[in-house]
Image: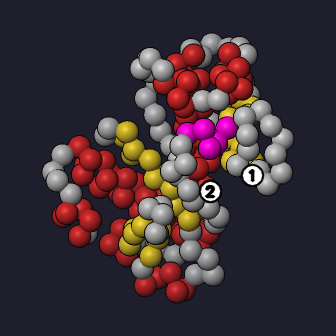
Amino acid sequence: LSSYREMVEGSRRTEWIFGRAAAKVAVRMWVKRHCDMVLYPADIIISNDPSGGPRVGGRWTSQLERVPWISIAHKGTTAIAVAGPEPIGIDVETVCRREEGFERIAFHESERDVIDNLNGSSSRDEWLARAWCAKEAAAKAAGTGLSAGPKSYEVRKIDAASGDSVVTAGASPGGRDEGRTDFAIKS
């Protein structure tokens, strides 16, 4: 509550509160389904870990074998959240024409090639938005966000039919590096 009060009134504050509300719904649904426990929104505390990622708390957590992980995303007045048993990531973006240079800054050449080779009814702008969301979701699941820059994650594959993708963290573009982590992202 203090984080909310410290924010200047405006769109960022609205996005923040919408995101927290969505997260509480996701937590309530997950806990009910997996633990058969009914929670009220006031029971759930959403705080941030040291890296800024959202974490769930509240007295009820001591009654669970495992506390759900959450991820929150918002764009304008749209807010979404997901809860799960392991670190998880989600993102939402608007499909629109991007500024000049966005692709070069956000994506490796190998990623742009993946997008270039997609067939289907979706526009390039939609595939760019999906690829960006996939990177954001993977970075949130990894607990790092895109703090090291958008090229610290690489979209290696996109299934044109489903939109599902594979995103790699810790790899050089197009490489098969040791120590990489692959994330399967559902679209």
| Vertical arrangement, residue 101 with respect to residue 166, above or below | above
| Colour convention | secondary structure
- In the rendered image, is residue 88 in sight? no
Q: Residue at x 64, y 66 (%)?
A: 85
Q: Position of residue 180 (x, y in %)?
A: 77, 50
Q: Which residues are magenta?
A: 150-154
- The residue that disc 2 covers is 142
State yes or no: residue 173 in magenta: no
Choose between 32 and 66: the one closer to the eye.
66
Choose between 134 and 186: the one closer to the eye.
134
| Vertical arrangement, residue 173 with respect to residue 124, above or below | below
Q: Residue furthest left?
A: 9
- The residue that disc 1 covers is 181
Which one is earlier in the sequence, the residue at label 1 or at label 2? 2
The reply to whether discs 1 and 2 touch (Cβ–Cβ < 8 Å) is: yes
Q: Position of residue 6 (x, y in %)?
A: 19, 63
- In the rendered image, is residue 24 in sight? yes
Q: Position of residue 101 (x, y in %)?
A: 48, 20
| Vertical arrangement, residue 95 with respect to residue 86, above or below | above
Q: Amino acid at mark 1?
A: Thr
Q: Main secondary structure of the magenta part?
A: helix
| Vertical arrangement, residue 133 with respect to residue 84, above or below | above
Circle 2: element type: helix
